[in-house]
Amino acid sequence: MRIKKTEERRQKTEGKIAGQKRLLSLFFLCVLSVLCGKNVTPAWAGEEQVRKAMKKSIVYLEISSYGYDQIRPWRNTEIQQKSGVGCAVGKYEAITPAWNLTNAKLIKARVFGQNEYIPAKIKTVDYEIDLALIEFEPNDLQKPLNPLKFADKFKRGAKLNYYWLDSAGNLTTGQGYLDRAEVRGSPVSYNSFLTFVVTNTSQETGTGQLYCIETTPIGIGCWSDGTRETGLIPAAVINNFVSKARESNYPGVATSGFEAGELLDPATRAYLKMPETLKTGVQVTNVYTLGTGSGILSPNDVILKIDGEEIDGHGKFSHPVYDRVSFQHLITSHKVGDEIDFEIWRDGARQKIKVKAQNFNVEQMLVPFYEYGKQPEYVVTGGFVFQKLTLPYMANFGKDWDGKVSPHLFHYFRDTAFKPTDERKNIVILSYVLPSPINLGYIDLAQQVVSKINDMPITSMADIIKAQNSKPESKFDVVEFELDNPTVVIPRSPLPQADALIGRNYGIRKMVNIISDTD
């Protein structure tokens, strides 16, 4: 007991001495600043000032979300609780990674010095660059937020400080090192955009934490693989988004409408009639019907330059700040509607073409990559469950889903997801069959692509209803599939009673969920 009290007295004495030394150090620095005419601030005092300032600019987010069961699309999934970080870009506005808000139904925020949670709502969300702008009611905040100014700074190896607010309202800090800039795919979309990669972070981040070089904000955390690497959405992307996100008709960012691969093989260059002295450029391997370059570029075109920047055989160009990054950055940096200068090699000669910067809505895709916040379209008739083919539907089959879904379905995803046409806007499938007396003999059918219903080609989900109404005198609905799969015949007379029984047995309150072409 006596030893314990002695130790406590020793610690208190050392604490007092340390405090006196700090005050004495500050006193001498103040004297020095007066004598020398310079402002000299100790490091610990500067860090405390930064922390104090950050408290007014960062919010803690608590998000309640739920989606829909992809196999039983009439059912909601369980409510999930997520957390994230928001960084102020206006007195009553903050940005956060879009993936924080996927399928969000309720967003609450906590600000420093205010105990109660306040509601927030989404102003603009762009999954293609993983950014969202949220806003607060002025009356809900005791004090306005202090907007941050993000600077486009990049220095390889620079020490970074990052900040976030936890659920208790405490400001927490960490450190890492800026390693490189690269173009990476969005964690919640099909697009790729400029990303900074940070290494050796002291704690796992990736939900919107604010990263700074010294006191200058340069980005927010958007993904993490633990404490090894963390991705940042950099200032260049943030500032471009914020400048447009307040518009009533947010235009989005330009998106590539083609795929290009490395062009390093001399034999391939010779096949494309390129001279031996020309060693730059990437080969266009696939052209979509959506996005920048669709309808203008062709397979086997070689992209030599974009906006005057030379593209090497790996698909990279030399950026004055970020070093060598993918040519995709030159496209996503443009505003939608801009003209982009391309220099290509086509038919044995150099050509200069103008390409309009374009993007597209995910709903326009033949196989959509996501349907956040939306109930999937479906039709249940006679126990036959018809759905639209989407990536979330296939991913629902779990790990290694690409080997579990029908090869025919995977073909549509892999080869034609970005190639809708007037003749094919959706891939409509018979997902599976709910056993019932009306569908005896068909219950093993699943994952079949629908080609026709009642002799009418099915180009979208809305066509199902049109086809059902196309032959009012018929006693049957006849469903045909691709790949010579068996035809399904559904008798119409017992259908109302059968659907009522199926709805009751399987908990389906709504047998049809379709957005018509006129909606």
Image (spheres, helix red, strand yellow):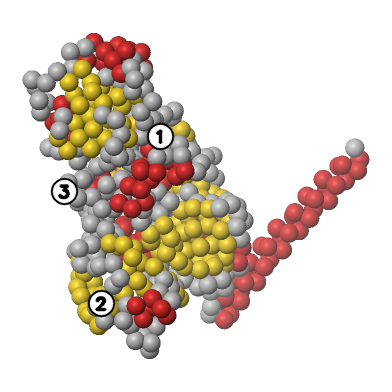
Nearer to us: label 1 or label 3: 3
Q: Quadrant of the N terminus?
A: top right
Read off the residue under disc 1.
65
Give the amino acid type for the residue marked by disc 3 in the picture: Asp
327 w.r.t. 57: above or below: below
Name the residue: 50% across, 43% down.
400
- Which amino acid, mark 1? Ser
Q: Quadrant of residue 152?
A: bottom left
The residue depicted at 21 percent of the width and 45 percent of the height is: 424
On the image, the x and y values in percent for residue 248 come to 20, 50
233 or 293, nearer to the observer: 293
Q: Amino acid at mark 2?
A: Arg
Q: Nearer the viewer's eye, disc 2 or disc 1?
A: 2
Quarter where residue 66 is shown: top left
Q: Position of residue 518 (x, y in %)?
A: 12, 37
Residue named by callout 2: 346
Q: Is residue 76 above or below residue 172?
A: above
Residue 466 is left or right of residue 322, and the answer is left
Q: Give the residue pinned by disc 3.
A: 422
Q: CA distance from mark 3 to mark 2?
A: 28 Å
Q: Is residue 34 left or right of residue 11?
A: left
Circle 1 SS class:
strand
4 or 246, nearer to the observer: 246
- Tell me residue 102's x, y (percent): 38, 41
